[in-house]
């Protein structure tokens, strides 16, 4: 078995061939490099936050600086890592391959989306190095529009520009999936990863423009001193929150849906079994995307929103848990009587199911009006969303990176190290964030640089966990890079998986498929014999 | 190499798939534009429900005659744009160019009238910010209305400028004979964008210029 | 690709209707109809938008898929405005102790 001589990685050398590429696979790698850099920047900020919280007085920094630390951590992790992560890296790489196409519908728009992402990130970095923003990632007014002396404008501009990056990605995915599927690939034969990316793209299209215009209004207010959101000048600060969360709540579904899609690919492969309830999983993705747009007011329960609207939003928030639960049931049913292999991607999928379930269930706690009055703005909320975004989305992302690494790079990573880091990440994660549920319930507010001494033990546990977690994240960086040179050659289908992407060489040629494949079977057609044939 | 061959991008199998993708892509982009302007419409709706009298007073500061003329100008430009696409469908090269130029001229006329309106507002010290002077009741909320006036018509005008640029490119391509009845999707897609900009104005006009005039 | 070529009569007919509706909306706005003013204004605007969308933008003649997308955009805008107004318009409805 040898590496294919002509593949997308060596088809053309030099910076220009990469920076002017329209190959979706190369663009995916450009995104991979960018977001990995930004992930570690966001992670370093998290490290500073956790170290500061080792002592009740705040070990490292005062309140002003601390405000900038958590704001920048949140902004970078959400807008410049999580939101693009799976769609821009794995989605860009796999969408054409999974439907048997040569590229996305609009390759040049794809390249443009990467440049917009880089441009937006650079503006965010400019904001960071000139002192950062201290408003919280939520930019609540009138602090962000009138009273904050921090660098709100470049950051808002950066997010605005990056928003268009994700709009273009979503547009590309929707058009590609609608118009470029291979013969025989009906909607209900699509890999579930594509259903989840389609649902994610719906959110990109319908939600992102609203935060764009909202940030533009914040900018207008800062520059011209008008009072669109400033009560002192006749404006309504709660209006800002409505407009902000109209996007930012669906944004969390942008962050979790692709990870759910990854899990839906991994579990059938490593349980050697068809997914249980394919159409339920497919429809639940769309349901989450749609229902996710109807619940944003649960972020405004204690902001002065009408109690009547609060009740409506609370009820709708309970509804959106249902399709997520359906997925968890279907994954579990797929595992039942499956032939389970504990390869690294499967470890991440297991971790996802457990941690997402905890995060999701605690979402119901905060969706309850009365409970939220008690836990709003406490560490309970912080723990809830980190369970979903880190325990869920990041685990899903890492699982996907490991699952498709052989296809992307043509190499296998060292399995023992990979399994070890998955376990280290899982343990580190839980030690970091479980204590935060307790902290929050006991009354520890979020965004505080210092705290009463009775909370110290839990904070120290959390910081210890974050150290382990950070170490766990560094491990894949090391061994994945190592594998590029020293890893065993992967071959076209090391996992014996179904799906059109596994029918190509690893790494694939630039045009993906020499001849457009024809699809004649349902998705996840795993059985004992087929598994043998694929290897 | 046939004309169809040069127009077909490599990721597509045939011109029909390419045309399908192009029009679907533009419609999806227009949906993002609906939500982009939509945020402003939502803010407008909230404040109009909170401050109806202030919004009526603010609306009276807008010049209905100019707004109405502009509405007619923009509708006319939509007609010429639609006829330009029709000319491509029926293979009349010169007509495409002439109609595109007419559309651009009407668009420029719209912007010219807008410029005049903005000039009047400036002369009357009605630009929001520190220079804003309004000596009637609800002054703060009237300034809020004027903020929305400028934000909404300003964003709309920006889209018109981009649209005129886009049509200029289309006119050059049309003059070079790039559009045939078999392949004219760039023109069609540009037309969709132009009509959308008209659509936004169709709502802006009554919402900004015609609020409770008699009160 | 077989494009649907509309007749000149159709295009000019739509144009005439749009101009008439514009005149109409200005005329109605000058009457005092109380709450109905905004209803008429938005209805006429919707009618004009419908004409532009269906005929000039060829929505009437495109695929189901495109029609659904266009409608979805409008529905989502309606969701944004309606649910936000559901807060703004009901802030005084249910008294809460301590609320002004």
Image: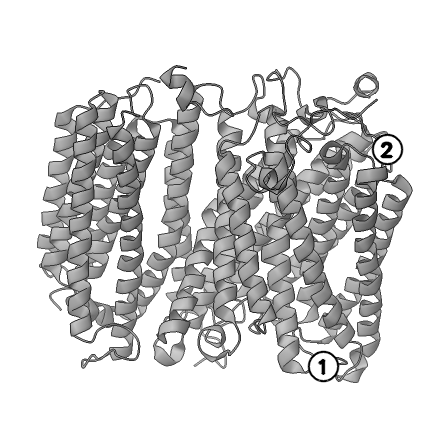
Please name the residue shown 25% across and 35% down the image: B171
Count of numbered tags:
2
Question: Is the residue A58 above or below the residue A217 in the image?
Answer: below
Q: Where, quadrant-wise, is the C terminus of chain B in this rendering?
A: bottom left
Mark 2 surroundings: few (<14), some (14-19) or many (≥20) residues within 10 A: some
Residue A376 found in image quarter:
bottom right
Query: Cα distance, mark 2 to mark 1?
Result: 50 Å
Q: Which element is circle 1 on?
A: loop
Query: x%, y% of residue B132?
Result: 25, 78
* Point 79% across, 54% down: residue: A473
Give whichever of B50, A469 is nearer the camera: A469
Task: Please report whichever mark, 2 or 1, sits nearer to the chain's N-terminal start.
Answer: 1
Q: What is the x, y in percent for residue B182? A: 32, 19
Residue corresponding to mark 1: A450
Q: Is residue A280 above or below residue A369?
A: above
Name the residue carrying label 2.
A488
* Local SS, label 2: loop
Quadrant of the image containing the N terminus of chain B: top left
Q: In front: A439, or A23?
A: A23
Q: Is residue B188 visible?
A: yes
Q: Position of residue B11 (x, y in %)?
A: 51, 25
Residue A194 shows up from this direction: no
Horizontally, residue A139 falls left or right of residue A18, namely: left
Quadrant of res A461: bottom right
């Amino acid at each position: 078995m040898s590496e294919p001589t002509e593949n997308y990685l060596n088809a053309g050398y030099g910076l220009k061939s990469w920076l002017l590429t329209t190959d979706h696979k190369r663009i995916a790698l450009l995104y991979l490099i960018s977001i990995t850099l930004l992930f570690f920047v966001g992670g370093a900020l998290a490290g500073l936050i956790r170290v500061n919280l080792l002592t009740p007085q705040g070990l490292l920094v005062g309140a002003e600086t601390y405000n900038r630390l958590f704001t920048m951590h949140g902004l970078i992790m959400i807008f410049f890592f999580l939101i693009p992560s799976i769609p821009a890296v794995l989605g860009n790489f796999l969408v054409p391959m999974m439907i048997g196409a040569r590229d996305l519908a609009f390759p040049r728009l794809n390249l443009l989306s990467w440049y917009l992402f880089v441009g937006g990130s650079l503006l965010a970095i400019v904001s960071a190095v000139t002192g950062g923003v201290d408003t919280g990632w939520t930019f609540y007014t009138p602090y962000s529009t009138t009273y904050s002396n921090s660098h709100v404008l470049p950051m808002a501009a950066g997010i605005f520009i990056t928003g268009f990056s994700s709009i273009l990605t979503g547009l590309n995915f929707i058009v590609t999936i609608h118009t470029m599927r291979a013969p025989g690939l009906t909607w209900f034969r699509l890999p579930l990863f594509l259903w989840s990316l389609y649902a994610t793209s719906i959110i990109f299209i319908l939600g992102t423009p609203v935060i764009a215009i909202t940030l533009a209004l914040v900018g207008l207010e800062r520059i011209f001193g008008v009072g669109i959101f400033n009560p002192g000048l006749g404006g309504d600060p709660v209006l800002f929150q409505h407009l902000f969360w109209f996007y930012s709540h669906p944004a969390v579904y942008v962050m979790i849906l692709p990870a759910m899609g990854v899990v839906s690919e991994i579990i059938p492969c490593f349980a050697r079994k068809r997914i249980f309830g394919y159409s339920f999983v497919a429809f639940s993705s769309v349901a989450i995307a749609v229902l996710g747009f109807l619940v944003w007011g649960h972020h405004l329960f204690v902001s002065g929103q009408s109690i009547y609207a609060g009740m409506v939003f609370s009820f709708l928030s309970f509804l959106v848990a249902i399709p997520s639960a359906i997925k968890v049931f279907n994954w579990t049913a797929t595992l039942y009587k499956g032939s389970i292999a504990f390869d690294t991607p499967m470890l991440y999928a297991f971790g996802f199911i457990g941690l997402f379930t905890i995060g999701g269930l605690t979402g119901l706690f905060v969706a309850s009006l009365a409970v939220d009055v008690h836990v709003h703005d406490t560490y309970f909320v912080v723990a809830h969303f980190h369970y979903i975004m880190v325990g869920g989305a990041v685990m899903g992302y890492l699982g996907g990176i490991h699952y498709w690494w052989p296809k992307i790079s043509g190499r296998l990573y060292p399995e023992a190290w990979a399994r070890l880091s998955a376990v280290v990440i899982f343990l580190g994660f839980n030690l970091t964030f479980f204590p935060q549920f307790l902290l929050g319930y006991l009354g520890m507010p979020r965004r505080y640089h210092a705290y009463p001494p009775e909370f110290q033990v839990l904070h120290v546990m959390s910081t210890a966990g974050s150290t382990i977690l950070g170490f766990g994240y560094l491990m894949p960086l090391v061994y994945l890079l190592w594998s590029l040179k020293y890893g065993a050659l992967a071959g076209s289908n090391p996992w014996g998986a179904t799906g059109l992407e596994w029918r190509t060489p690893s790494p694939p040629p630039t045009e993906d498929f020499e001849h457009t494949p024809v699809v004649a079977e349902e998705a996840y057609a795993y059985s004992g014999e087929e598994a043998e044939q694929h290897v | 190499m046939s004309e169809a061959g040069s127009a077909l991008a490599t990721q597509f199998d045939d011109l029909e798939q390419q045309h399908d993708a192009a029009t679907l892509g533009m419609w999806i982009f227009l949906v993002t534009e609906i939500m982009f302007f939509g945020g402003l419409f939502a803010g407008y709706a909230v404040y109009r429900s909170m401050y109806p009298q202030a919004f009526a007073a603010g609306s009276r500061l807008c010049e209905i005659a100019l707004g109405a003329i502009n509405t007619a100008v923009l509708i006319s430009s939509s007609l010429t744009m639609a006829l330009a696409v029709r000319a491509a469908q029926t293979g009349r090269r010169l007509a495409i160019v002439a109609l595109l130029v007419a559309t651009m001229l009407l668009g420029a006329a719209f912007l010219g009238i807008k410029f005049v309106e903005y000039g009047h507002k400036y002369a009357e010290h009605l630009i929001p910010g520190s220079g804003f002077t309004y000596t009637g009741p609800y002054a703060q909320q009237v300034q809020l209305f004027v903020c929305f006036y400028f934000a909404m018509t300003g964003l709309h005008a920006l889209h018109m400028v981009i649209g005129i640029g886009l049509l200029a490119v289309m006119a050059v391509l049309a003059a070079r004979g790039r559009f045939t009845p078999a392949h004219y999707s760039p023109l069609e897609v540009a037309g969709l964008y132009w009509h959308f900009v008209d659509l936004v104005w169709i709502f802006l006009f009554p919402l900004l210029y015609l609020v409770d005039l008699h009160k | 690709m077989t494009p649907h070529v509309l007749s000149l009569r159709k295009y000019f007919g739509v144009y005439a209707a749009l101009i008439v509706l514009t005149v109409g909306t200005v005329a109605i706005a000058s009457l005092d109809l109380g709450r109905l003013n905004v209803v008429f204004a938005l209805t006429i605007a919707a009618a004009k938008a419908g004409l532009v969308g269906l005929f000039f933008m060829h929505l009437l003649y495109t695929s189901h898929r495109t029609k659904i997308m266009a409608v979805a955009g409008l529905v989502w805008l309606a969701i944004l405005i309606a649910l936000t107004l559901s807060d703004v318009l009901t802030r005084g409805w249910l008294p809460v102790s301590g609320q002004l």
